[in-house]
Image (spheres, grey):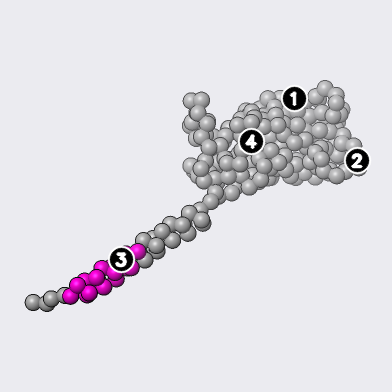
């Protein structure tokens, strides 16, 4: 039978505490590292190709769109259903959402109207636009059924202060490829492309009057 001295027992206890303490510190350090590395995934809208029109005003200004306040957030509004707004805890816009929508509309129109000069409101220019494109967006989200939905009042003016030459409230839907945030953002980008199709076609008609 082995006998352990009091000194040996205390030494073993000290060793055990040291090892256990080190383990706790190691686990805590791992958790802190994981927390410090966690953060949102950023998404950006993108332009979508469409039909090209040759007859159009030569200078077009895309005005900064107005957006319902509950969509104008850093985090992505993933769904609205039953009077409940669901905001993603892990997915965010890479830039201010109204800036992105305006930029995408500008790029979409520039592709569809290759003979035009299309620029964003407040961009430095010494020319006076022949047409202005405005959007008032009241829906920019996913509904309870999973569809991407955009409702926008699209306005085209031939002069910034004159009555609209074209004014139509559009509600467009698209089913995302899957349930991911990326698929939702792609679907929203495609809907903006469809709105640009409508704007380009009517800008061509305005130029023929």
In the foreground, 5 or 118? 5
Residue 167 numbered mark, or none = 1
Cβ–Cβ under 8 Å for marks 4 and 1: no
In the foreground, 82 or 49? 82
- Where is mark 4, residue-wise? 72
Mark 4 vs mark 1: give the one in front: 4
Mark 3 vs mark 2: give the one in front: 3
SS at badge 2: loop
- Where is mark 2, residue-wise? 127
Please give the range of residues in magenta.
5-21
Tell me the CA gap for discs 3 and 2: 77 Å
Main secondary structure type of the part rendered in magenta: helix
Cβ–Cβ under 8 Å for marks 3 and 2: no
Mark 1 vs mark 3: give the one in front: 3
- Mark toward the start of the polypeptide (3 vs 2): 3
Mark 2 vs mark 1: give the one in front: 2
Residue at position x 57%, y 41% in the image: 75
């Amino acid at each position: 039978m082995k006998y352990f001295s009091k000194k040996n027992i205390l030494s073993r206890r000290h060793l055990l505490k040291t090892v256990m303490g080190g383990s706790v510190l190691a686990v805590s350090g791992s958790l802190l590292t994981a927390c410090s590395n966690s953060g949102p995934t950023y998404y950006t809208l993108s332009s979508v190709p469409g039909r090209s029109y040759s007859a159009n005003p030569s200078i077009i200004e895309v005005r900064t769109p107005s957006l319902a306040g509950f969509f104008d957030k850093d985090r992505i509004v993933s769904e609205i259903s039953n009077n409940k707004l669901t905001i993603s805890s892990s997915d965010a816009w890479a830039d201010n959402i109204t800036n992105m929508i305006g930029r995408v509309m500008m790029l979409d129109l520039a592709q569809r109207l290759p003979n035009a000069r299309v620029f964003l409101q407040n961009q430095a220019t010494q020319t006076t636009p022949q047409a202005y494109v405005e959007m008032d967006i009241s829906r920019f989200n996913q509904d309870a059924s999973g569809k991407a939905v955009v409702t926008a009042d699209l306005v085209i003016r031939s002069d910034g202060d004159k009555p609209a030459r074209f004014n139509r409230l559009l509600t467009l839907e698209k089913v995302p490829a899957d349930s991911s945030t990326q698929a939702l953002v792609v679907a929203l980008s495609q809907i903006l492309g469809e709105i640009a199709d409508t704007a380009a076609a009517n800008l061509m008609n305005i130029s023929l009057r």
